[in-house]
Amino acid sequence: MNVTNHNRKAWNKKVKNQISYTKPVEQHTITKAGKGDWAITLTTKKMVPREWFPSSLQGVRVLCLASGGGQQGPVLAAAGAEVTVVDISEKQLEQDDYVAERDGLTLETIRGDMMNLYFFEDEFFDIIVHPVSNLFVEDIQFVWEEAARVLKPNGTFISGFTNPLLFIFDEEEELKGNLVVTNAVPSSTLTNLTDEEIQAYLNTGETVEFAHTLEAQIQGQIKAGFAITGFYEDNFGGNRPIDRYINSFCVTKAVKLSDSLGGVRNYS
């Protein structure tokens, strides 16, 4: 099974169903950003600290990685950045194009895989923002290495990801208020399912997700050549029972070490 293609179709379906994290920002948000009053979130509620960004984004090359949906990219473009948005879902990218046309913004959208950014040259971007999305790929080391490759030395990489403890609980029971441990980490949506159950799940058109260890999330970035310089947590905003016990999301700020080559690959 091609997980990337399956998840692409699943995200297109989410856009059609107008799931909250596929809805583009409103025009007044862009107007404020153009006046210097802006903020973005990579999780659910908490905003990325402004001090993680330079005081001015004018002329700063920003990659919004696996970040379609008309949210982070248009805001940063309105604030002055030279923005490129990469996402596997063409429908998500259409949301960015819609906001850009609506509000007179300049940004580039590219349909592509976060694990393989072959269409970018080495050391091209100053900043990468990467919302919670690496749970949709099986091997996130490719994501870290590609981010390091296309980021300039001393560039900033801001990444949101899921706390692996969220995945150990049975989701249906958790939504009922019962924390029942059923899953190991690492694992995936399809782990421990029979062939028939796997096919039945795939037929629902829902995303296939992967539970990654904290070692893969943190040490993986370090291995790729990053130094972690900032961290915070977030949750579902009180909308799920698990919020009473633990934060389900993490965000790191990392800096690419000047002597790091990242995951340089030969695409010839």
Image (cartoon, rainbow, N blue to C red):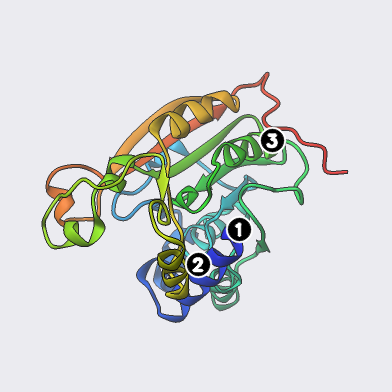
Q: Earlier in the sequence, mark 3 or mark 2?
A: 2
Where is residue 6? Give x, y as percent: 55, 66
Q: Residue furthest top?
A: 259
Residue denoted by label 1: 85
**Gap between marks 3 and 1 measured at Cα:** 17 Å
| Residue in front for this viewpoint, 51 or 259 | 259
Name the residue: 66% across, 22% down: 260
Q: Earlier in the sequence, mark 3 or mark 1?
A: 1
**Gap between marks 3 and 2 measured at Cα:** 25 Å
Q: Amino acid at mark 2?
A: Gly
Q: Is residue 95 above or below residue 65?
A: below
Image position of 131 (left or right of 91)? left
Q: Amino acid at mark 1?
A: Val
Location of residue 207 (image quadrant): bottom left
- Let me know if residue 239 appears in the view: no
Decide: few, some or many residues near mark 1? Use Cα within 10 Å; few <14, some 14-19, many ≥20: many
Q: Which mark is residue 222?
A: none
Residue denoted by label 3: 149
Q: Earlier in the sequence, mark 1 or mark 2?
A: 2
Q: Amino acid at mark 3?
A: Arg
Name the residue: 30% across, 49% down: 46
Name the residue: 55% across, 42% down: 139
Decide: few, some or many residues near mark 2? Use Cα within 10 Å; few <14, some 14-19, many ≥20: many
- Let me know if residue 228 appears in the view: yes
Residue denoted by label 2: 70
Q: Nearer the viewer, mark 3 or mark 1?
A: 3
* Count of numbered marks: 3
